[in-house]
Image (spheres, rainbow, N blue to C red):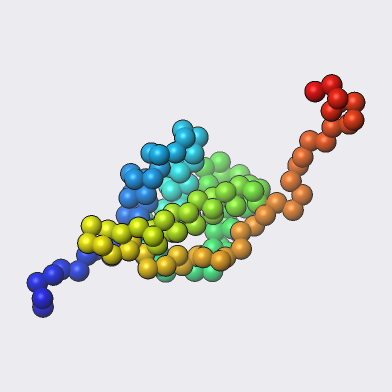
Amino acid sequence: MNGKSEPEPLTLGGLFDIYGAEVTPTKGEHTRQHDRTTMAMFLRFFGRNRDPVTLSQRDWDRFIRERRAGRIGPSGRPVSDRTVEYDLKFLIAVLNWAARSRDERGRLLLDRNPLKGFRKPTEKNPTRVVLTEDEYRVS
């Protein structure tokens, strides 16, 4: 043994704690609230002690199914693909940040984003307000 102890493996909970302390405070109030709510939801779903590099396509697909159906999330109700996409964009952002950020010893928090390139659900026909020509002119 060379006297150097191996660092504790980074858990999803530990990663969210670091991100929540270092990155979330730099955001606007609404986004900070979304970060906190979404981190809590992901930790309940995947587990606080989950190794982030073990997240897989199966986890991604299961999250999408469960979130759409309303079985997870703060409201307990089904949500749109836009909401699921917003949640997943946050998770991707955290994992991308961790793959670029180093610990006190100069090691990357994560060597890669395990969910990179996965397809996010998108709203097929987002509701858009359509104005008539007269309504447009008046406004």
Q: Residue at x 35, y 58 (%)?
A: 101
Quadrant housing the N terminus: bottom left
Q: Position of residue 83 (x, y in %)?
A: 61, 47
Q: Position of residue 37 (x, y in %)?
A: 46, 42
Q: Residue at x 80, y 23 (%)?
A: 139
**14 over 27 or under it: above or below:** below
**Where does the image place residue 19, in percent across and percent down from the top left?**
37, 49
The quarter of the displayed image where residue 137 is located = top right
Q: Nearer the viewer, residue 96 or 5?
A: 96
Going by the image, does 27 lie left or right of 106? right
Residue drawn at x 48%, y 54% is 93
The reply to whether residue 80 is in sight is: yes
User: Whole-percent x and y of residue 20?
Assistant: 37, 45
Residue 55 in view = no
Horizontal relation, residue 134 to residue 126: left or right: right
Quarter residue 58 falls in: bottom right
Residue 31 in the figure: left or right of residue 47: right
